[in-house]
Image (cartoon, rainbow, N blue to C red):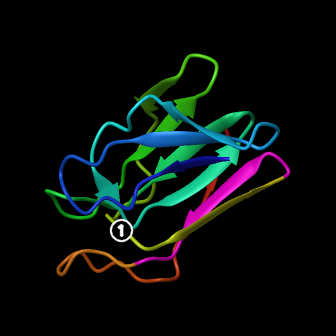
Amino acid sequence: MYLTGAARTTGMFEAWKYISSTDQWIRIADFPDARNSTSSFSLKGKGYIANGTPVSNWQTKECWEYDPAANVWKRFYDIGHKRRDNGFAFSVNGIAFVGGGSGGANDGTTNWELYRLNK
């Protein structure tokens, strides 16, 4: 299990991994920015943080990929055509789905958009 996000200030970049066999949390590579209201999912052994609101900015379309073997975050690609936060994400049978949420004041995003990601 991995944990990141929920930032309230610009200095909250930490990401953590939980190892159940030893009941320990281990700090992993910091996430690239302080962000909250994200959606997350795992797919084919990697973790993803999608959309959300960077603390010092507006909602975003960005999606970031975490590679546990390399302990590195990298920009994956944008999801959707509008910025959003407070959405949902899940993966089933090797396919990830990201959708819902709300957008910026003037971008027209609805809560009904759903994007299918095949990697």
Of the pair 13 and 107, the residue shown nearer to us: 13
Please determine whether, in this image, residue 58 is positioned above or below residue 68. Answer: below
Picture coordinates of residue 50, whole percent (x, y): 46, 53
Q: Decide whether residue 100 is among the magenta residues.
A: yes
Question: Hey, which quadrant is residue 45 in on the image?
Answer: top right
Q: Position of residue 5 (x, y in %)?
A: 41, 55
- Please state the horizontal and vertical placement of residue 110, each as a whole percent of the image: 41, 83
Identify whether 34 is placed above or below 7. above
Magenta stretch holds residue 55: no
Q: Residue at x 43, y 61 (%)?
A: 38
Q: Specify the segment rendered in magenta.
A: 93-101
The amino acid on which the numbered mark 1 sits, given as a three-letter code, is Arg
Q: Is residue 74 left or right of residue 42?
A: left
Give the position of the C terminus as an image quadrant.
Answer: top right
Residue 118, quarter of the rendered image? top right
Q: Secondary structure at mark 1?
A: loop
Nearest the camera: 11 or 89? 11
Determine which residue is flagged by label 1.
Answer: 84
Would you identify the image quadrant in which residue 47 lies? top right
x then y, percent, for residue 112: 52, 82
Image position of 31 with respect to 92: above or below = above
